Image (spheres, rainbow, N blue to C red):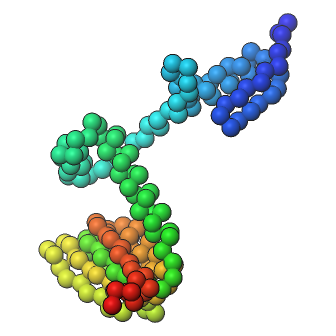
Amino acid sequence: MWRIWEYNINISTFSFRYPVAFLATRLVEGYLAENFSFQEGYMEKKLMRIGISLPKELLNKFDKTLMKRGYSSRSEGIRDAIRTYNQHYEWMQQIRGKRAATISAVYDCSKKGVSSTLANIQHEYTDLINSSVRFHINPDSCFEVVILQGEGEKIIEIAEKILSLKGVKHSRLTTISEEKIGKST
């Protein structure tokens, strides 16, 4: 016959109180082993392993950059890149009010549909766009700058559409509030 004990388990903000048999104990131990590591009396959140596919040229360039900057591993470089990406996204979410802005993008104009999709996105936002200019860097790459003025939320909306478009190799959003423009004179 199995004996059942009652356990109180506190894991950071989680608290459980229930009868635990052998199987349930193993389940909790499995959860703890899967999600936490125990070192010298304290719990530390485990790192998650992921797999990504990258073009060889991009990975080689990334590795060279990591070496120049003194990173100890690819993982640390990727963690730093993800943190930077998240910070940029958070910055974009804080853009509010009347703004002047530019969105610059380098994209693969030889890739079917990229140029027409960019044009369609711009046609959706003619109320914001003051001007745009595009030129060919080489036969397969175009550089385009879109100059906008309007509400920050709408500028972010168009920027997100352009920045996430497949075929866009590099992009950047730059904004300034109309309030700051007035103060600089």
The one nearer the camera, 60 or 175, is 175
The residue sitting at the top extreme is 1
In percent of the image, x 23 and y 77: which residue is there? 143
Relative placement, left or right, of 3 versus 172 is right
Residue 92's image quarter? Answer: bottom left
The one nearer the camera, 143 or 43, is 43
Relative placement, left or right, of 22 versus 122 is right
Residue 126's image quarter? Answer: bottom left
The residue sitting at the left extreme is 138
Q: Is residue 37 above or below residue 73?
A: above
Task: Tell me residue 159's x, y (percent).
Answer: 41, 75
Residue 128's image quarter? Answer: bottom left
Q: How many marks?
A: 0
Looking at the rendered image, the quarter that the C terminus falls into is bottom left
In percent of the image, x 51 and y 82: which residue is there? 97
Relative placement, left or right, of 3 versus 150 is right
**Visible in this render: residue 121?**
no
Looking at the rendered image, the quarter that the N terminus falls into is top right
In percent of the image, x 39 and y 89: which residue is there? 182
Task: Tell me residue 4's x, y (percent).
Answer: 83, 14
**Visible in this render: residue 18?**
yes
Q: Is residue 164 above or below residue 54?
A: below
Task: Tell me residue 109's x, y (percent).
Answer: 25, 75
